[in-house]
Amino acid sequence: MSMDQSVLICDQVAPILNDILQKNGLKITYEPEITPDQIKEKISNFDIVIVRSRTKITKEMIDRTTKCKIIARVGVGLDNIDVEAAKTKGIRVINAVEGAMNAVAELVLGLMLSMAREIPRADREIRNGKWLKKELMGSELSGKYLGIVGLGNIGKRLAKLARGLNMNIIGFDVMPIADDFARDVGLIKADIDTLLSSADYVSFHVPLTDATNHLVNAKRISTMKKTAYIINTSRGEIIDENALYDALKDGRIAGAALDVFEKEPAVGNKLTLLPNIICTPHIGAQTKEAQTLAANVIGEKIIMILRGVI
């Protein structure tokens, strides 16, 4: 396939992506603030479209393409791209599953430590002139059971990091979990309901599908320990936020940490009013290293596709 290709980049990406594409002769239009209406107007002019999470590529946009060959997501999830519409038009959809695994796994560890030691509260109270040394009695992660729902790249990386903190790992995935990996990290395989009822911390790493929408509902939360914590860095719709709110408000679980929400931005979300939740603004992959790696992966994949290697 010719390298004489036009590329529309719709979101802010690490400079290495531009470098890779330009060095191989591709023509780049960089519009990180482009609007949906502008995409509809311009998309027919491009062979390749690149997005992160801000931009949604809808069926209406895809229907307007005339020569598009590749839609690339500089990240993991593909729920902001109508993949079926792209397939119908013969457009390849690619992502960078490798890019965010360490960044997201490290964020989960940070959130677990923050909940276990009440770090946000400690910081907040000392700024308010309160020295709550006796009241801030935390717990240790060592020896606790971490349930990981979804053992893809991110889930596996989290398991390895958590094992380094001497946590016990319980894992569930709809796909078979390799025995050698389970042995390496001491992972206990379990169905999702056993995992939820057994774990001290539960972290979700699944794509958003019809099957995973509201995977965490009132019934499943009711099976968890009162001392358990939920962490979600995958997609907000995985959790029924009303059910989670009620459980946190009534003390039926100890706490939660959310990096993703059903509607984003989540400013004004009632969950943010609760004292036993930590909220972050979808920053799982927001590290310099992760963004550079994801951009590099996408750049190399595009070039390999054009060369017919993959």
Image: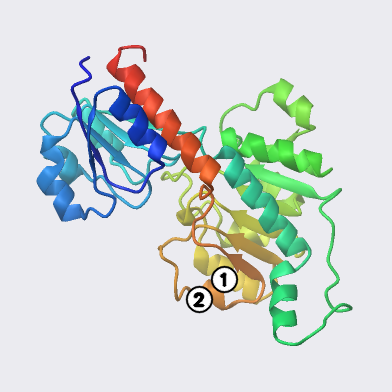
Secondary structure found at label 1: helix
Q: Which of the labelled discs sits on residue 245, or is there none?
A: 1
Q: Residues within 10 Å of mark 1 (few under 14, many from 20)?
A: some
Picture layout, residue 248 above or below residue 76? below
Judging depth in this view, the residue of 277 and 120 nearest the camera is 120
Q: Is residue 30 above or below residue 123?
A: above
Mark pair 1, 2: CA separation: 8 Å
Is tag 1's residue or tag 2's residue first in the polypeptide sequence? 1
Inspect the image, locate mark 2, and give the three-letter code of the amino acid beneath it.
Answer: Lys
Name the quadrant of the C terminus.
top left
Disc sitting over residue 270 in the figure: 2
Contact, mark 1 vs mark 2 (Cβ under 8 Å): yes
**Which x, y percent locates residue 6?**
18, 31
**Vertical comparison of 92 with 285: above or below:** above
Q: Quadrant of the N terminus?
A: top left
Residue plotted at (65% across, 47% down): 106
Residue 255 locus on image (x, y percent) = 68, 66
Relative to 244, is 126 on the left or the right? right
User: At label 1, which amino acid type do we have?
Assistant: Tyr
Asked whether residue 223 is in view, the answer is no
